[in-house]
Image (spheres, rainbow, N blue to C red):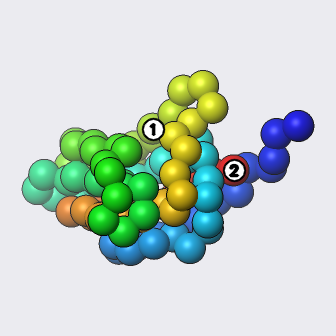
Amino acid sequence: MRSDVQSKRVTGTGSLSVGPARIRQIQVLTTTGSPRLTITDGNGGSTVLDLDFIASDSHSVNIPSDGIRVSDVYVSAFTNITAMTVFYN
């Protein structure tokens, strides 16, 4: 049986402190410039998601299938982004 989807809003880099998880969706609110988001598998781990966005807009990124499995959701780059909500289980 699948576990319930949860969410967490962040406004900067660092660990989401949710433990092992599967990233299912990300919603991002960008500012001006060249917005970029990079998520790694823990602090210093391999890059699992690296996205560039259009400035001054909101974006929804759906992760296909069972999502991206990580030991810890770690935001290593949060450039020209106001806030992000990560949906995970």
Q: Residue furthest left?
A: 33
Residue pictured at 61% horizontal, 66% vertical: 19
Q: Secondary structure at mark 2?
A: loop
Report which quarter residue 59 is drawn in. Answer: top left
Q: Amino acid at mark 1?
A: Val
Q: Is residue 2 visible?
A: yes
The front one of 49 and 28 is 49
Q: Is residue 86 left or right of residue 2?
A: left
**Tag 1 and tag 2, C-beta contact below 8 Å:** no
Rendered view: 64 above or below 24: above
Residue pictured at 60% horizontal, 46% vertical: 22
Q: Is residue 29 visible?
A: no
Q: Secondary structure at mark 1?
A: strand
Percent position of residue 69, x then y:
55, 44
Q: Amino acid at mark 2?
A: Asn
Q: Is residue 87 left or right of residue 80?
A: right
Label 1, label 2: how far apart the Cα atoms are: 16 Å
The front one of 25 and 83 is 25
Q: Which residue is mark 2?
A: 89
The numbered dot on residue 61 is 1
Q: Is residue 77 left or right of residue 8?
A: left
For the N terminus, the image quarter is top right
Percent position of residue 43, x then y:
36, 68
